[in-house]
Image (cartoon, rainbow, N blue to C red):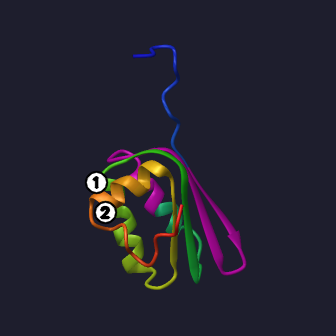
Amino acid sequence: MDQGAAPPVFSAVAEVDGDQLRVVVTGEVDMATADAMYQAALREPARHVTLDLRAVTFFDSAAIHAVARLAQRFPGALSVLPSRQVRRVLDISGLGEQDWLQPD
């Protein structure tokens, strides 16, 4: 174990462009941070939401639940850009073929 490495820092930054909202998420999305990711996607009114998870290093069941809630909240208007780790977790959970999940 590399004890000199800093822990991954979580952030969820919302960027608005007209009626498009992009939420760029970095670090670990888990029980402690999944709601912050979810709330960031609701912060601004938008017709389409892109959840950019390409910099996510850890993704657990709380994160899956938050994404599933966003998919229900924005039917046909959510796009998820996964990291390799996120893709793997969603594939294992049976969500790898959802329309909102974009190719990595």
Mark 2 and mark 1 residues within 8 Å of each other at the beta carbon: yes
Mark 1 highlights which residue?
A: 61
Read off the residue under disc 2: 65
Helix, strand or loop under label 2 = helix
Q: Which residue is drawn at 52% across and 72% down?
A: 79
Taking the spot 50% from the left edge, 52% from the top edge, the residue there is 83
Image vertical order of residue 93 relative to residue 1, above or below? below
* Image coordinates for residue 4, horizontal then vertical, percent: 51, 14
Q: Where is residue 95 in the image (x, y as percent from the top left)?
A: 32, 68
Magenta span covers which residues?
Answer: 12-38
Residue type, numbered disc 2: His
Out of 49 and 87, give the one closest to the viewer: 87
Question: Crowding at label 1, few (<14), some or many (≥20) Cα neighbours within 10 Å?
Answer: some
Residue located 31% across and 54% down the image:
62
**Which residue appears farthest toward the right when viewing the image?**
17
Quadrant where the N terminus lies? top left
Residue type at numbered disc 1 = Ser
- Quick one: SS at disc 1? helix
Asked if the magenta segment contains residue 13, the reply would be yes
For this view, does 53 lie left or right of residue 34? right
Q: Position of residue 75 (x, y in %)?
A: 43, 84
